[in-house]
Image (cartoon, rainbow, N blue to C red):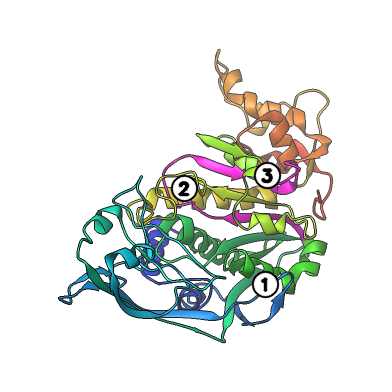
Amino acid sequence: MKTNKEDLYQFLVELFPICRSLTGPGVRQTLKMIQEIVPIHVFEEPSGNQVFDWVIPQEWSIDSAWIEDMSGNRVVDFANNNLHVMSYSQAVDKVMSRDELESHLYSLDDLPQAIPYTTSYYRDDWKFCLSKHQKDQLNEPRYRAVINSRHYQGSLTWAEVVIPGVLKDEILFSCNICHPSLASNELSGPVLATYLARELLQTTPRYTYRFAFVPETIGCLTFLKHRLQHLKEFCKAGFVLTCLGDANEWSVVKTKSSDSLADKAAMAVLRHRSPLREYPWFNRGSDERQYNFPTVNIPAVCLSRSKFGEYTQYHTSLDNLDFVTENSLYESFQMLAELIEVLEANQIYRVTSIGEPFLSKKGLYPAHSTRFSGHGMKPLMNFLNACNGQRCLTEALEYSLAPARLILDYLPSLIKTDVLKVVEHEGYKR
């Protein structure tokens, strides 16, 4: 079963209209659709439960919302775009003056055509989000504001799927399921995670892979409440997936040490993808905050195209189905599939020959030597020079700067022809 770009993009299109929030029916609907592709296990954490220093809030749902003039004309309507209402807004049905309404309107002066996204999870409030153009047209003296929403004792929903490997050592992929119609920021992560898990389910990997689908921050902490001790013992690397749908630069937010297996594996596949922006730990912002926190200490990098908070469309209606493309989403899938290949092959290798190996007789060197053939083989030879029986694959790629894809393609033949020997068979732990 091979994933194609049409499948990825179509799934994102199907998820896009759903109104997700920190809790509520939109999250469950999203997980139900994911469950039709991979056998995730869904969990509920009741409202009021303590999660470390946090408390699960009341559940929130919304049916409809609008602003109308005194003639009954709806000038802002949640039915047209689910970003129009601040997430977790209190219910309201009130006629008020334009001046009174102003404090409940949120728009962006620098992006007058965009509807902004905002939340108020832990403070009672209500607000309509609209473009500056829409706001400027609200020039009647009085309006009626209606939000049909509910807060109630319910639960926070999260899910995971575990693909058992030969080793108990785990690789974690984590993504968020709590934003409404934001295509790259929200949906690229769960879409890619879903199809990566589907591919892995058709194999018997060396590592065990865990995919977590969680509301951001408190959902991630809820996941850690139930899995922390296990992850501390077995998780060797974590990857937070977000903002992977656009066609712009590649981005990686590194761990505090910048030297973990997660960092090395991420750089192995991103180093030769251009342009690449590397962010230190202090530029964190997604759930890598929780995984790398000192009392958790699970080394996890955040992988993106345009990084959260760094692109114009971020947290606005401009992060839509036009911003995400089939090709860019599929390129991200290919990058993550290559990342898994690197992790699966991350053992210690030792070159066997005294001096350079005679690659021609093994069919690994061009049959005809030209003045440029040596240049073409230089990355492979650099990699072989790095295989001293002490470096694992990610370290050898870092040392040699050889493209991961090139080495992954050569690696089976290098082992089959005894150019390389695996020094450690039972998994490499760094």
- Nearest the viewer among 296 and 315 is 315
Say above or below: 24 vs 292.
below
Instruction: Write down the residue under mark 3.
Output: 281
Query: Is residue 106 visible in this depiction of the protein?
Result: yes
| Left or right: residue 264 compared with residue 89 | right
Please give the name of the residue rendered at 63% of the width and 58% of the height, measured from the top-left corner.
287
**Front: mark 1 or 2:** 1
Badge 3: residue crowd in 10 Å (few <14, some 14–19, many ≥20): some
Give the distance between the C-alpha atoms of the residues marked 3 and 1, in whole angstroms.
Answer: 23 Å
Which quadrant of the view contains residue 231? bottom right
Q: Which residue range is magenta in the image?
A: 235-263
Instruction: Write down the residue under mark 2.
Output: 331
Mark 3 or mark 1: whose residue is earlier in sequence: 1
Residue 404: image tag? none
Badge 1: residue crowd in 10 Å (few <14, some 14–19, many ≥20): many
Residue type (three-letter) at the residue carrying disc 2: Glu
Residue type (three-letter) at the residue carrying disc 3: Trp
Magenta segment includes 236: yes
| Residue 4: x %, y % from top left | 42, 57
| Residue 249: x %, y % from top left | 48, 39
Say above or below: 2 vs 218.
above
| Left or right: residue 203 compared with residue 95 | right
Give the distance between the C-alpha atoms of the residues marked 1 and 2, in whole angstroms.
Answer: 31 Å
* Helix, strand or loop at mark 3: helix
Instruction: Write down the residue under mark 1.
Output: 222
Residue type (three-letter) at the residue carrying disc 1: Thr
